Each structure stands twice: as C-alpha cells, then as structure tokens.
Amino acid sequence: MAPGARPLSRICSSADWTDADFLARMQAVVPSQLGAHRKAWEFAAALEVLETTEVLNEEAIGLSVAAGHEALVFYLANRCRWMFAVDIYGEGPFGSREGSAAMLVDPDVFAPYPYRRRRLTVAHMDALDLRFEDATFDCVVSLGSIEHFGGREAAREALVEMARVLRPGGTACVCTEVTVDGGSDGHAPGLELFSPASARGLGESVEGLDWAGEVDFSEPPEGVPVLALEREVLGRAIGTLGYPHIRLGIDVPDQGWREFTSACLALRRV
Ligand SMILES: C[S@@+](CC[C@H](N)C(=O)[O-])C[C@H]1O[C@@H](n2cnc3c(N)ncnc32)[C@H](O)[C@@H]1O
C-alpha cells in the first residue's frame, strides 16, 4: 500500500474528510452535502473502490442493490453504459422514505443533477432473489442496506446473490453498519450491527468473492460526538440533522447502548 493510502475495506473515519481525493469524490456524488455525513462517505468509499478496481467505463454494466433513491445511482449512470437500481420499493419500513415507490415511476424527481436518464433502469426486486443472469455485471454496490435484510444470514445470502450476478473480475462494494465500541454484534429490531471481526467474516464467507485491496476494520480513534440514531432518523425527516454525522448510537435490547458507523467491504469476483 502506498504511504498514506488507506485500505479500501475500512471503517468510516473523520480522517477521510481531510483527504483531498476523498473529498473530491464526495463532492462529485453529492455536491449539495456540506456537513460531514457518513452517507456521503459511503458514496465516496464506493466510488473509490470502483475507480481503484477499474470497473467504471462506457461499456460497464452496474447494479445497486437496495438502492432506494440514493445519489450514487444517478452519478454511476454518468459513468457506466447501463446502471440498474433495484429495491423492494414501496414496501417495509423504508417504503415511504429511502425506498419510496416514486423512484419506480419517476426517478428524475430524485436526481441531484443532470444524468443520462436512458442509462438508468429502476426495478422492484428482492435483494435475496435478483432477477438477473449469472455473471451479468461489472460492478455491484449496496449501501446501508444489508443490515436491514432480516439478520446476519440474510445479509450473507445477499452477498451470495451479488457474487452470482458479478462477472469474474467484477467488483462488489458493500457498505454496512459496524460497531465501534469494542463490543460484539448487535441485533436491534430491523437492524444488524456487525462487529469488526464479523464484518471481516462476512466478506470471507462467500464463495467466489475475495477482498479487493487491503482490509483493516480496526476502529479509528475519533473525537466526534455520538448521535442517537432515533433522533437522526427524525432529523432527516424534518431537515435538522446533527453534524458531524459519523458515529451513531442506539439502545439495543439486552445489550444497552451500542455505537456504530459505516464500513466499506471491497470485494472482487474471482
Ligand atoms: C437505509 S435504506 C438505504 C437506501 C440506499 N441504498 C441509500 O444508501 O440511501 C435501506 C434500503 O433497503 C431496502 N431493502 C430492505 N430490504 C430489502 C430487500 N430484501 N431487498 C431489496 N431492498 C431491500 C429498503 O427498501 C431501503 O430502500
């Protein structure tokens, strides 16, 4: 690894906001995001993985699994031949938020900037049953979603599906929730928190996937405040998010207060 370079698979850290290249990637995907927010980090981390593994080009076919109406799919439509965004739009707890069915009807409403609208296809699809042939995609991303699929085994099954639809040599980039309090996994209703060891185990549990680049899920030392997830969900709805939005906390049944942030898993289809 080059001096100063960070592993592709790592935990979100405020240090990334001091890296000019990383900041430029955040700006490229979400130009309107001013405060430090881990969603912009996930977009930039995914873009870093796709660029480093050289899978973005005018012939590339990309897929975002449980995409909601995320900015990244519009950005990638400008960098790929054809981009697919799939989600169980309109269903479940996110059906009136990130997973709004309006994305199926008129994705342009959610586009943060002009994009090649003939290169984006949006479909209703379960992440555990992707309706695509094997080896279809050059790249697959899934951000902030596998932790909501119904448990650790469902998260792993989603990775199995992603591996199946990736062509050999293709790249998968998965961002999910990883604990940063030194504890084990957490299981809140509708939300899995992976310990750093479990995140590594998840990446290594799927046949046909291997790490792309360096992996380091050690917890970065941080001095940032920990925001309560419940308040942040409400704040997102009414436009009063706290910043820096990097570390979050949640009361987990039988475990108490747990702290977590995003982590990026960069994987290559072998
Ligand atoms: C927190 S949102 C993240 C959305 C988007 N990736 C983003 O980063 O803004 C989680 C998404 O997972 C979707 N989802 C949950 N279970 C799913 C499943 N089994 N298959 C496909 N999508 C699912 C939800 O509908 C929701 O859009």
Image (spheres, rainbow, N blue to C red):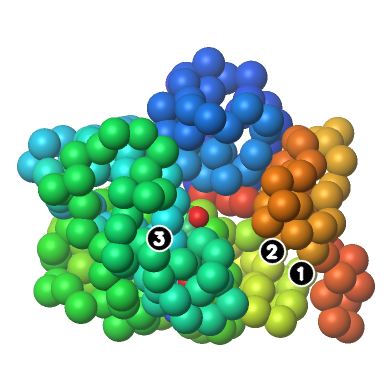
Q: Tell which of 251 and 174 is nearer to you.
A: 251
Position of residue 211 in the picture relative to residue 178 (left or right)? left
Position of residue 109 in the picture relative to residue 3 (left or right)? left
Q: Is residue 241 visible?
A: yes
Q: Which mark is residue 67?
A: 3
Q: CA distance from mark 2 to mark 1?
A: 5 Å
Give residue 231's quadrant in the image: bottom right
Q: Tell which of 127 and 187 is nearer to you.
A: 127
Q: Which image quarter holds the C terminus?
A: bottom left
Q: Is mark 3 within 8 Å of ligand 1?
A: yes
Q: Which mark is residue 48?
A: none
Label 1 crowd bin: few (<14), some (14–19), many (20+), radius 10 Å: some
Which residue, given by chain and number where applicable, does mark 1 sit on?
184
Mark 2 lies on a secondary structure that is loop
Mark 1 lies on a secondary structure that is loop
Give residue 80's quadrant in the image: top left
**Amino acid residing under circle 1:** Ser
The tag earlier along the polypeptide, 1 or 3, is: 3
The tag earlier along the polypeptide, 2 or 1, is: 1
The tag earlier along the polypeptide, 2 or 3, is: 3
Tell us which disc is closer to us: 2 or 3.
3
Residue 126 in picture, x, y percent from top left = 35, 80
Which residue, given by chain and number where applicable, does mark 2 sit on?
195
Residue 227 in picture, x, y percent from top left = 83, 50
Position of residue 101 in the picture relative to residue 168 (left or right)? right
Residue 142 in picture, x, y percent from top left = 42, 59
Give residue 185's quadrant in the image: bottom right
**Amino acid residing under circle 3:** Ala
Mark 1 and mark 2 in contact (Cβ < 8 Å)?
yes
Residue that appears at 26% across and 77% down: 130
In the depicted structure, whether residue 189 falls above or below residue 186: below
Q: CA distance from mark 2 to mark 3?
A: 24 Å
